Amino acid sequence: MEKFILNITASSGEFYQGYCESLTLPTGDGVYGVQAGHNPVLVALHMGIAKFTVDGETREVLVGDGIAEVTPTFVLLLVDSAERPEDIDRNRAEAARIRAEERLQHKQSMHEYYQSKIALDRAMQRLQTAAKYKR
């Protein structure tokens, strides 16, 4: 199977760089699939699981919102965050969920409301992902 270079860069730094055989990306409409030779395109990413195959082994990573630049020979993911599902700290994610829900109970500006909603969505996605990958 043909390969392409995949680079996943989060706001905290480079998460992964290497060859990849196939890739599925989380979008607002579902998932978007990529293989070597794909036509150039920019894809808006939504927080969710990105799956990529390296040497026949599928790997998964929880990515935050971002953008993917796809070309025939490489894919660059620029995302808010990236973490392996098995590395998610469930206690920390649960605490973040509780904090976000408490903030939503208080009167706040529209900006603060949307920030709280984003924090709650992020915490819920992390908890759901962690539940699938019990240690």
Image (cartoon, rainbow, N blue to C red):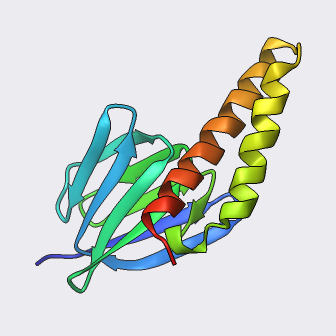
Q: Position of residue 26 (x, y in %)?
A: 38, 46
Q: Position of residue 105 (x, y in %)?
A: 82, 21
**Which residue sits at x=33%, y=79%?**
19
Q: Position of residue 29 (x, y in %)?
A: 32, 31
Q: Position of residue 27 (x, y in %)?
A: 38, 39
Q: Is residue 56 above or below residue 26?
A: below
Q: Which sits in the foreground, 69 or 110?
A: 110
**Which residue sits at x=19%, y=65%?**
36
Q: Which sits in the foreground, 12 or 112?
A: 112
Q: Is residue 97 above or below residue 71?
A: above
**Which residue sits at x=62%, y=44%?**
122
Toward the left, the furthest residue is 1
Give left or right: position of 43 versus 61: left
Q: Which sits in the foreground, 74 or 67?
A: 67
Q: Is residue 119 above or below residue 58?
A: above
Give left or right: position of 13 versus 54: right
Which quarter shows the N terminus?
Answer: bottom left
Where residue 59 sits, quadrant-wise, is bottom left
Where residue 101 sits, quadrant-wise, is top right
**Which residue sits at x=23%, y=60%?**
72
Toward the bottom, the furthest residue is 55
Give left or right: position of 133 versus 73: right
**Image label count:** 0
Give left or right: position of 121 versus 69: right
Q: Is residue 63 above or below residue 65?
A: below
